[in-house]
Amino acid sequence: MTSAPPADDRCEVSCIHPEAVAQARASLPDAGCVEGASAFLKLMADPTRLKILSALHAAELCVCDLAAVVGLSESAVSHQLRLLRAGRVVASRRAGRVVYYRLLDSHVTTTIANALDHAREDRD
């Protein structure tokens, strides 16, 4: 019987480096932090929501403006904004009868910029 060639993504021998494993385990965030970060990233992983967030990266916009920018109904955009607001990704303010949205903080801004920069690297 011939053995299959080693896969490029696996070690050719089984070995564990105890110090490296201990250091990596010690650096793991707690379960609640992992869950929160995962939920945050999932909110941004949707293409429609990423378009909305990219538009908000440029300027504070109302629901009507966002609908025009991303090419969706105001109802669809409003639904996505409710999810983003609940996930603490965007904040809103009311000015009379108009509700304006903006990115919540610099963490959101940086994450979006980094994700888009990374995607552009693949294209260059």
Image (spheres, rainbow, N blue to C red):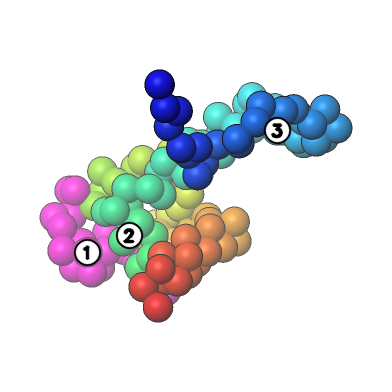
Magenta-highlighted residues: 57-76
Residue 2 showing in the rendered view: yes
Badge 3: residue crowd in 10 Å (few <14, some 14–19, many ≥20) = few
Marks 3,1: beta carbons within 8 A: no
Badge 2 amino acid = Ile
State the separation of the CA atoms marked 2 and 3: 29 Å
**Rendered position, 100 above or below 121:** above
Q: Position of residue 83 (x, y in %)?
A: 36, 40
| Mark 3 or 1, nearer chain start | 3
Which residue is situated farthest in the top direction here? 1
Badge 1 amino acid = Val
Count of numbered tags: 3
Classify residue 73 as left or right of residue 3.
left
Residue in the image at 18% along x and 68% along y: 68
Local secondary structure at mark 1: helix
Label 1 sits on residue: 70
Q: Which mark is residue 52?
A: 2
Residue in the image at 79% along x and 31% along y: 17
Badge 3 amino acid = Pro
Classify residue 67 as left or right of residue 98.
left
- Main structural element of the magenta stretch: helix, strand or loop? helix
Marks 2,3: beta carbons within 8 A: no
Q: Is residue 25 magenta?
A: no
Marks 1,2: beta carbons within 8 A: yes
Q: Where, quadrant-wise, is the N terminus in this rendering?
A: top left
Label 3 sits on residue: 29
Q: Is residue 64 magenta?
A: yes
